Image: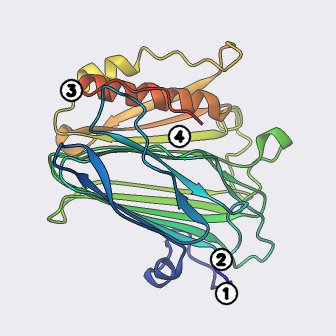
Amino acid sequence: MPAEAQTIPERSPDVQATDDEALAAPTLALTLGCDRTEKTVVFQQYATYPLRLSRSLSLDSTDERRIYLYMMNSSPGLLANDHLSTQIHLKPNAQLYLTDQAATKVHRMPQAQTSASLTTHLTIEAGATLEYVPEPLILFNEAEFHQSTQVTLHPTGRLFLSDIFVPGRLARNEYYGFRRYTNRLQVRSPEGQLLVEDAVNIPGQTNPFKNSSFVAPFPAIATAILYAPDLDLASLTSWINTFHSKTHSDTPSPMQAGCSTLPYGNGLVIRAIADGVWPLKAYLHHILAGMRRVTGQFLLPTIPK
């Protein structure tokens, strides 16, 4: 959180954090590349409160090139006028699995003209692989949150990017009490060509569909973007379709999902809805495991949390 919070004018629903806000935000910047043995190492990292980064981990002894990192937020969550910024840069052939320690909580903002935001810039150079799998985002009552992700992806790079959105503390019967949530993603080539664009704009309290028979049973929403030059879409889709969602108690849990092929046929966008986060987390893990299989990468290990 900034040391001195300032009240900002209310943002239009489809407008993200400004460049000035992003520059003034607590920032995490990370650059990775390969050493002489082709292992991925951290070249440079910088973080200011409340963001922190774990040490580099190797969760699979057979996969020596890839490293696993956890982002950490030492604050209790995002408050009004918190504007965070992260920058991740993968140099040629670097491989990174990036996640965070716990769900991101966006707290109440009693003042109507306040919000929080997160701006993310990802750069993936030739032959590099980024798997970015954050924990769920939970919007409390009266919260407003705007997220923007800009990706620069080399034609030979690979990207798996996911998120889970939860419209309240469901265990407390808190449901669509937030004001608004927006999320805009753009993936471009190094020359600036637009490869993928996805935009989400969800009103909370004024949402006309929140009590419908389709939305109410499936409050949690997940999105995954998969992009790779060597992606066999038929094999990957077949793998994804083998998933049968179950909760930790082994009781079948309702979930709906659909996917679309990205332009140029090099990837998929997948969106799923469920009655909670556990089926969605299992589904995203299954999808990423399939992506690794069909692109000839090492199998996805268990990610400890």
Q: Residues within 10 Å of mark 4 (few under 14, many from 20)?
A: many
* Camera-nearest residue between 210 and 24: 24
Please name the amino acid that badge 1 sits on.
Answer: Gln
Please name the amino acid that badge 4 sits on.
Answer: Ala
Residue at image location 38% in from the left, 28% down from the top: 60
State which tag comes first along the sequence, 3 or 2.
2
State which tag comes first along the sequence, 4 or 1.
1
State which tag comes first along the sequence, 3 or 4.
4
Residue at image location 29% in from the left, 22% down from the top: 293
Q: Residues within 10 Å of mark 3 (few under 14, many from 20)?
A: some
Q: Circle 3 is placed at which residue position? A: 232
State left or right for residue 60 relative to residue 297. Answer: right
Determine the image quadrant of residue 65: top left
Q: Residue furthest right?
A: 172
**In what element is the residue under mark 4?**
strand
Marks 2 and 4: in contact by CB < 8 Å? no
Residue at image location 19% in from the left, 66% down from the top: 192
* Camera-nearest residue between 142 and 278: 278
Marks 1 and 2: in contact by CB < 8 Å? yes
Q: Circle 1 is placed at which residue position? A: 6
Spatial distance from mark 3 to mark 1, Cα to Cα? 49 Å
Residue 193 horizontal/vertical position (percent): 18, 61
* Camera-nearest residue between 281 and 245: 281
Spatial distance from mark 3 to mark 4, Cα to Cα? 22 Å
Q: Circle 4 is placed at which residue position? A: 222
Residue 137 horizontal/vertical position (percent): 62, 50
Please name the amino acid that badge 2 sits on.
Answer: Asn
Please name the amino acid that badge 3 sits on.
Answer: Asp
Spatial distance from mark 3 to mark 2, Cα to Cα? 43 Å
Marks 2 and 3: in contact by CB < 8 Å? no
Q: Residues within 10 Å of mark 1 (few under 14, many from 20)?
A: few
Q: Circle 2 is placed at which residue position? A: 81
